[in-house]
């Protein structure tokens, strides 16, 4: 059996495990890494390399930062500000999604989530709103807004235009077109998550959720910090967040900044060594490591490219430009939820460009479709690498993501037939 087929079977097994909800998420991640080694899909250093991946280091450090935030008065102060929204959950969700959009545009979706997760959990706990009603809307909006402009991870956008030109396209994509293409989708996502999404999400009790995510919950039995340590905790936490937002402009990696912040919280005594270690959620760390290994295997074995090639062949048979643009968009969205945004867009931009050039049509709309759809990795924790962060904190399962996210994905796919087509007709 070829490595590609084995990898696809592992992917299928992971999906079944997630859907069943009976397999511990940490065990899923460990089994994936073990299977990739046992079947010689990846060498052991690469299969288990996700454990020391910079994203995992970032998440681990932010668990500690999150605990530090919970120990200070930041959350209680923020909760008082939004106390007025206690009986207006729709308004709270709307503003939360707007904040997610702004943070993600200037940094990326993961940074936006790790910054806001402990604060959102604390606010929900304090005002009595179920975390499961708020965390997924924030996450969906954040990942969907990431890379929308030239800020933060969006600095990569023009590289896709460069790839397109190198392959033979005549005209580049304007730097602002990536934002214009994304805005209609973001507006719909925010409205959907404000008015429809929460109705499709579970209503878990926060006290039960706190047992699974102690780093995201304030321990009411803990002795309050002294005034000095409280100020130190606030300064270190906020400074870490601000510097992380500016990381792409000051040439520092987010994981370096987060790790430094976590260490400072322990060194200054804001957190004890025991508290910092207890804050680490190994369930999430092992799951993310496993999903990173699986995404790597999908790329290395050519499984993702195989799907893209097959769709490129189908594209040649479609004559209606709106349906063709829809195909480019839908395939991009599906693949990004299996491989992650960067991997999928790296594969699909050259594929869609070459397909369009063979058909004698302008590839700019197709490239924008791939770039836009690759941001919508909110259906599975396989492609959406930050989704595992909210699984424990919000008590979500894969079924919850699909129940709330699939209708939105269908709406976005329908929009995908038209938005970039109007900007750059095929």
Image (cartoon, rainbow, N blue to C red):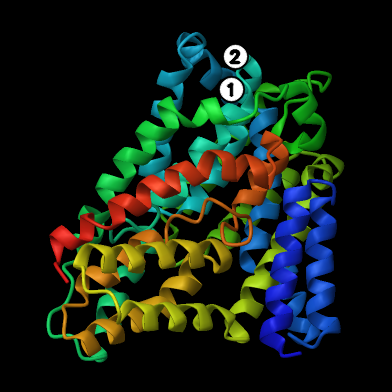
Q: Residue tagged by mark 2?
A: 127
Q: Residue at x 59, y 44 (%)?
A: 401
The quarter in which the N terminus is drawn is bottom right
Q: In this view, does 376 lie to the left or right of 390?
A: left
Relative side of 10 to 117, left or right: right
Residue at image x 37%, y 36%? 190
- Report which quarter residue 384 is drawn in: bottom right
Q: Can residue 20 be seen in this view?
A: yes
Residue 80 point in image, percent of width and height: 52, 13
Question: In the rendered image, which quarter is residue 92 located in?
Answer: top left
> In the rendering, at what x and y percent does residue 308 appear?
45, 78
> Which residue is at the front of the view, 118 or 201?
201
Residue 313 on image: x %, y %:
38, 84
Asked whether 414 or 60 is in front, the reply is 414
- Residue in view at x 61 percent, y 62 percent: 55
Q: Give above or below for 198 relative to 275.
A: above
- Measured along the vertical axis of the image, is residue 161 above or below residue 222? below
Q: In this view, does 56 lie to the left or right of 379?
A: right
Q: Is residue 187 shown above or below 80? A: below
Q: Considering the numbered disc 2 on the image, is that residue within a helix, a strand or a loop?
A: helix
Q: Count the marks: how many? A: 2
Mark 1 surroundings within 10 Å by alpha-carbon count, few (fewer than 14), some (14 through 19), many (20 or more): many
* Disc 1 to disc 2: CB gap under 8 Å: yes
* Cα distance between the residues tagged 1 and 2: 6 Å
Q: Where is the C terminus found, in terms of image quarters?
A: bottom left
List x then y, in percent, for residue 354. 29, 87
User: What residue is disc 1 on?
Assistant: 123
Query: Callout 2 environment at 10 Å: few (<14), some (14 to 19), or many (20+)?
Result: some
The residue shown at (40%, 19%) is 91
């Amino acid at each position: 059996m070829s490595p590609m087929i084995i990898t696809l079977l592992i992917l299928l097994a992971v999906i079944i495990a997630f859907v069943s909800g009976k397999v511990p998420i940490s065990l899923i991640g460990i089994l994936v890494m073990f299977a990739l080694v046992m079947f010689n899909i990846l060498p052991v250093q690469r299969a288990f390399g996700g454990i020391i991946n910079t994203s995992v280091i970032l998440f681990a450090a932010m668990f500690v930062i999150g605990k530090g935030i919970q120990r200070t008065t930041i959350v209680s102060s923020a909760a008082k500000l939004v106390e007025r929204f206690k009986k207006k959950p729709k308004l709270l969700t709307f503003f939360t999604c707007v904040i997610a959009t702004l943070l993600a545009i200037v940094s990326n979706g993961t940074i936006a989530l790790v910054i806001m997760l402990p604060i959102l959990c604390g606010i929900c706990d304090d005002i009595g709103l179920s975390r499961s009603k708020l965390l997924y809307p924030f996450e969906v909006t954040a990942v969907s807004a990431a890379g929308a402009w030239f800020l933060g991870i969006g600095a990569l956008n023009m590289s896709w235009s460069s790839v397109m030109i190198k392959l033979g396209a005549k005209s580049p994509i304007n730097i602002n077109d990536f934002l214009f293409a994304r805005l209609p989708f973001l507006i719909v996502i925010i409205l959907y998550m404000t008015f429809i999404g929460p109705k499709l999400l579970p209503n878990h009790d926060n006290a039960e959720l706190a047992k699974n995510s102690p780093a995201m919950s304030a321990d009411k039995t803990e002795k309050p910090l002294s005034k000095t340590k409280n100020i130190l905790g606030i300064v270190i936490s906020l400074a870490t967040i601000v510097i992380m937002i500016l990381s792409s402009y000051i040439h520092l990696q987010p994981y370096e900044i987060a790790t430094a912040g976590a260490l400072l919280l322990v060194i200054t005594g804001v957190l004890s060594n025991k508290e910092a270690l207890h804050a680490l959620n190994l369930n999430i760390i092992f799951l993310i490591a496993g999903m990173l290994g699986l995404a790597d295997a999908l790329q290395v074995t050519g499984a993702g490219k195989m799907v893209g090639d097959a769709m490129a062949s189908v594209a040649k048979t479609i004559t209606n430009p709106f349906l063709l643009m829809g195909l480019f968009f839908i395939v991009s969205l599906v693949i990004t939820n299996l491989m992650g945004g960067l991997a999928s867009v790296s594969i699909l931009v050259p594929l869609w460009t070459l397909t369009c050039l063979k058909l004698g049509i302008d590839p700019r709309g197709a490239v924008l479709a791939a770039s836009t759809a690759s941001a919508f990795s909110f259906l599975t924790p396989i492609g959406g690498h930050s989704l595992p962060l909210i699984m424990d904190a919000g008590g979500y399962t894969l079924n919850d993501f699909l129940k709330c996210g699939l209708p939105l994905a269908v709406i976005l796919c329908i929009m995908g037939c038209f938005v970039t087509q109007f900007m750059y007709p095929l």
